[in-house]
Image: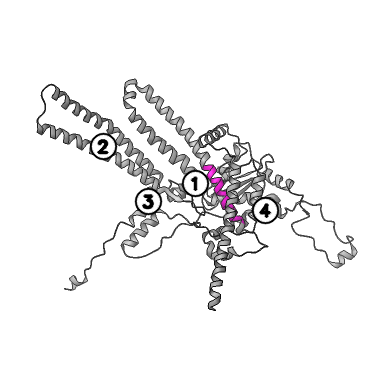
């Protein structure tokens, strides 16, 4: 009796917790390769099955024409075999199609802060492997190879005042990243109207969140089976401190970001030409004699320089607030690329999504034109393979251009949020990008490196998309719309608060 009384059944669980687990398992580059392999197996059997069924149907017709129709039992058995082979073919084709679309759906995610749908077919474990390769000195080695394409780079040392200036502004912007994870709590007074402070952004609908690993989904599933509610512990957001290089190249007036991951796996490269441009275009700044202002006592003022040593001549200019703001705008733009993991998105698109999809489509095309390739031999098959390679390369270039344009616009929008939280006026970014009408930052390499192939692919992408407006004008318009949205939402909140206080006044 005691044994029977102590026995109890565990409540039946539905399949809900399995969905995120399967999604985490499918969100990997190997899933697309498995779908491709399954598709090749199905396409291999497809001609055999179709030809076998066709041969059986023709045999039945020929026998009927010769006056020797098969018996009803033989006909029924033959039709049953044809039907079974069709069902088997449908199942073979359904498996890779299901795997392919399940991988695509599982890899969809919304970009933090903007909510743009994007696709990254890389598991968190694969992301961590990439981050480990770029951590520490790995980032400097990778960026050094990029810079070496334009000649031997001259790196400005960390003791140089230009590096100190850029580093100070970058760390100031980095300090605002924790605010992006919970803006309503960390900056609740965003809607307050103050004439002496720049406009502040409303809380983002999609705050900055880390990607949980597949192992965390598995742990969550096991805890759910055991009726224990334990929140998954996501890995840390790859973030500061970011790596920084200042390159002495007066001919390059730009910057670029590169990398992904913590421990310096992501960073920014700034060219001295941009700093020279900012210092020369804006009115000349004040100069300093040293990092600290000279302090003189009343005794030294009375006796002059009789008992004092004259100070050295000015060593370098002090950047003004306007010049620092322009530097912050460029750094915030490149920092947004790192925060939104744009490098990871581009890597997934160029190395996994587009080549994998093109390969699957090429396999389907080869099967469809199998009668032609069977008649004309390997020459046609080789031509189709070569055409697939060329088309894949061109499509990758077009895809990179389109993705890069979306990322540039998105980085502008997010950079305005970073600037506002760091104490800068985000409205200055509109003037900055209007002045730099011909320059577009790259998130993976320097604009000073000319690539004729890339230029031609950009022209091809423009023709395909039918774009009649320069990209820079689109970027400025999107940035203006974002700032206008801030003001609209602020007025809406203020109006609701005022109407609520007016309704509560008669009751008091």
Residue 85 numbered mark, or none: none
Q: Marks 3 and 2, how far apart in space?
A: 27 Å
Q: Which residues are the magenta region? A: 403-419
Q: Secondary structure at mark 4?
A: helix
Figure coloring = one colour
- The reply, left or right, for residue 92 in relation to residue 186 is left
Dot placed on the residue nearer the N-terminal end, 3 or 2: 3
Where does label 4 land, which residue? 325
Q: Is residue 415 magenta?
A: yes
**CA–CA distance in space, label 1 to label 3:** 19 Å
Is 359 magenta? The answer is no
First in sequence, mark 2 or 1: give its number.
2
Nearer to the camera, 309 or 131: 131
Q: Residue at x 79, y 52 (%)?
A: 314
Q: Is residue 214 left or right of residue 501?
A: left
Q: Residues under labels 4 and 1: Cα distance?
A: 28 Å
Q: Which numbered disc flags the more N-terminal residue, 1 or 3?
A: 3
Badge 2: how crowded within 10 Å, few (<14), some, or many (20+)? some
Label 4 vs 2, first from the N-terminus = 2
Outermost residue toward the front in this view: 506
């Amino acid at each position: 009796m005691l044994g029977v009384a102590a026995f109890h059944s565990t409540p039946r669980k539905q399949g809900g917790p399995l969905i995120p687990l399967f999604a985490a398992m499918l969100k990997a580059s190997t899933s697309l390769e498995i779908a491709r392999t399954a598709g090749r197996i199905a396409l291999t059997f497809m001609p055999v099955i179709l030809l076998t069924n066709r041969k059986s149907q023709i045999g039945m017709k020929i026998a009927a024409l010769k006056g020797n129709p098969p018996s009803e039992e033989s006909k029924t058995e033959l039709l049953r075999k044809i039907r079974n082979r069709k069902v088997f073919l449908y199942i073979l084709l359904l498996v890779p199609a299901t795997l392919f679309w399940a991988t695509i759906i599982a890899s969809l995610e919304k970009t933090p802060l903007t909510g743009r749908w994007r696709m990254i077919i890389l598991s968190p474990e694969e992301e961590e492997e990439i981050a480990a390769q770029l951590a520490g000195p790995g980032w400097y080695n990778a960026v050094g190879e990029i810079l070496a394409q334009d000649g031997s780079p001259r790196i400005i040392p960390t003791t140089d005042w230009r590096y100190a200036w850029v580093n100070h502004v970058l760390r100031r912007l980095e300090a605002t990243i924790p605010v992006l994870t919970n803006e309503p709590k960390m900056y609740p007074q965003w809607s307050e109207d103050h004439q002496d402070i720049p406009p502040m952004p409303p809380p983002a609908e999609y705050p900055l969140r880390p990607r949980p690993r597949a192992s965390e989904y598995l742990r969550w599933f096991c805890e759910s089976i055991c009726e224990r509610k334990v929140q998954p512990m996501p890995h840390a957001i790859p973030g500061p401190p970011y790596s920084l290089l200042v390159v002495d190249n007066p001919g390059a007036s730009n910057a670029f970001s590169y990398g992904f991951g913590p421990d310096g796996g992501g960073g920014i490269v700034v060219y001295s030409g941009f700093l020279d441009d900012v210092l020369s275009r804006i009115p000349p700044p004040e100069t300093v004699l040293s990092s600290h202002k000279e302090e003189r006592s009343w005794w030294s003022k009375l006796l002059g320089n009789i008992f004092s040593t004259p100070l050295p001549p000015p060593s370098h200019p002090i950047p003004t607030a306007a010049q620092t703001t322009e530097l912050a705008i460029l750094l915030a733009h490149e920092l947004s690329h790192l925060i939104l993991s744009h490098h990871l998105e581009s890597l997934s698109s160029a190395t996994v999504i587009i080549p994998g999809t093109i390969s699957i489509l090429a396999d389907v095309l080869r099967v469809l034109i199998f009668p032609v390739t069977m008649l004309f031999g390997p020459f046609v098959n080789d031509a189709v393979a070569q055409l697939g390679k060329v088309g894949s390369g061109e499509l990758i270039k077009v895809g990179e251009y389109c993705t890069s344009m979306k990322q540039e616009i998105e980085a502008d929008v997010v950079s305005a949020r970073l600037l506002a939280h760091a104490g800068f006026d985000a409205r200055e970014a509109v003037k900055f990008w209007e002045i730099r009408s011909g320059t577009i930052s790259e998130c993976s390499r320097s604009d000073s490196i000319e690539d004729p192939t890339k230029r031609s692919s950009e022209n091809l992408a423009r023709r395909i998309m039918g774009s009649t407006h320069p990209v820079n004008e689109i970027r400025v318009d999107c940035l203006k719309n974002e700032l206008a949205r801030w003001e609209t939402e602020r007025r809406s909140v203020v109006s609701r608060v005022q109407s609520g206080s007016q309704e509560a006044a008669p009751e008091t």
